Image (cartoon, rainbow, N blue to C red):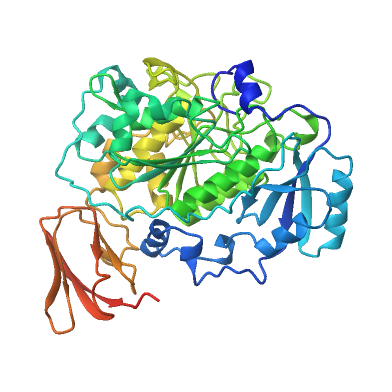
Amino acid sequence: MKNSKSFLISAFCFLLLGTFVYGQNPNCYRITFSDKNDSPYSIDRPEEFLSDRAIAKRERFNIPVIEQDLPVNPHYIDSILNFSSEPAQIIAFSKWNNSVVIFYPETEDCHDIIDAMLNHFSFVIDTLPVAYYQLPIISPIPLSIPQSFNPSVLQSVNLSSSCDYDYGKSIDNIKLHKGELLHKAGFCGENMLICVLDAGWDNFNTISYFQPLYENGQIWGTRDLIPEVNNVYTADGHGTFTTSIMISTVEKKMIGTAPKANYYFIRSENPFDEQLAEEDFWVQAAEIADSLGADVISSSVGYTTFDYAWQNIYTPADNNGMTSIASRAATILVQKGVILVQSAGNYGASDWYYIARPADALNILAVGMVYLNGIAVATSSHGPSSDGRVKPDVAALGIDVWCIGKDGNIHGTGSGTSAAAPIIAGLSACLWQALPHYSSLEIMQLIREYGNCFNNPNTIQGYGIPNYYQCYLDHANSVPEKVVSEIAVYPNPTTGELQVTSYVLQVTSVEVFDIYGRAVSTHYSLLTTHYSIDISHLPAGIYFVKVVTKQGEIVKKVVKQYRF
């Protein structure tokens, strides 16, 4: 459910794209497997299911690749697809939950097939009805492996440049957080990847304001997880509105909270109805974002109740971060080095009242909404989580937010926690750019600590409105105790590309020497947070990387391996 005002779907769009119709009995089931035994994938070959960027991030933060990261075993998938003579289709995958969603066309035998499958296969440990869809059998949907996604792992940033924008009226979006000062200090999201999970980006690719983003290469791709739609730029404009709050660069009119970040759009929300399977789509979207190497996920969709009574298996009492599949996946994201910014929901004046899933997840930033004067909006969903944790975590402007709609017009009518979440997501990306030596968990905790209600959190604003600029000022020259060195050079060993990360933000040069002390690669006047060095042309062997900063220099030994 999109956390904004309700929307209408035209009859034309429904006839053209709407193969989702009302029915009585489920024909989509979540099938959960017991293990990943005999998988063709291996944690020793992460490049088969993680992008170069994702692997580099794991190296950077010492995050191991584990069995949980392996895709669902394709042998198990083939077995359940071939179990019955009835045609079937896999419409969603989850490697973290080790499950798939299987769809059968209209059939009275669907329930019996699922029961027989549970009894027949020892590796099938659970089944759950999650949707009724009327779909044709379509081409197989590929596993969520970023096979063609390998942009530069970390692009260089010129920290001497300033993001000194004229925000126009859109200054209202970020001035509560002193975000414009963070921009002016030079942190506008460069190098960061934000994955946006939403219901659709109607007309985004044709709106003139966004064309420079494509020309600059800031839109890294799209993925549509909703069966038979297959084009994120149609059917719904909610994502256009939410993304514009982060990405816009229209001087004197509309400046986003992370205007220089890179973006990837994933449709996880069915724009035609509301069913439990959307939690499975959301999980797959989160896993795709992780596999792409996302730094931040901005999610302005959430789940409470569904269109069919038999799908309403959760109540606010289940908001413990570990019950629903979406909440469990959201909780896992921080373990993969991802910041999830999740809208809390707009149910404060409804019977539901509490936050929507997966805002109940552990170690994420669930976002409530306030007016421009900082007063909480009554319709913002309330916490705490059912196990007593402070929720939402923070708050941002959620009324009269400046945005660009699917009609291509700039207006100050954005509303809901759907609008508040991208404000926080964009600024969080900028803060992490400024403080790259902190982990995703540490960045989120800093953001909470700089909320204006940190010492007295409440159930509608959580820790309050965070001051991003003050957080940056207080930590710009600090390094966590766990960081042994101020310079990281990774991956090591490498087969071709080295990443250099400086925690002092003042790198002046990087030189690579062979074992005889001869310079084989030299780079001067960098002044960057991150820098990529291609040594694929060098023979395999031992090399030394000297990184010079204004605070001193350090030499790291690296091993160049053959690429087999």
For the residue pair 406 and 94, the one nearer the viewer reads as: 406
Give residue 451's quadrant in the image. top left
Q: Residue at x 78, y 43 (%)?
A: 104
For the residue pair 400 and 540, the one nearer the viewer reads as: 540
Q: Residue at x 58, y 32 (%)?
A: 383
Specify whether residue 325 is in view.
Answer: yes
Image spot of residue 36 (x, y percent): 66, 66
Image quarter where the C terminus lies is bottom left
Image quarter where the N terminus lies is top right
Q: Is residue 373 left or right of residue 306?
A: left
Q: Residue at x 58, y 47 (%)?
A: 284
For the residue pair 296 and 472, the one nearer the viewer reads as: 296
Image spot of residue 327 (x, y percent): 61, 44
Image spot of residue 546 (x, y percent): 16, 70
For the residue pair 385 and 3, the one nearer the viewer reads as: 3
Give residue 453's quadrant in the image. top left
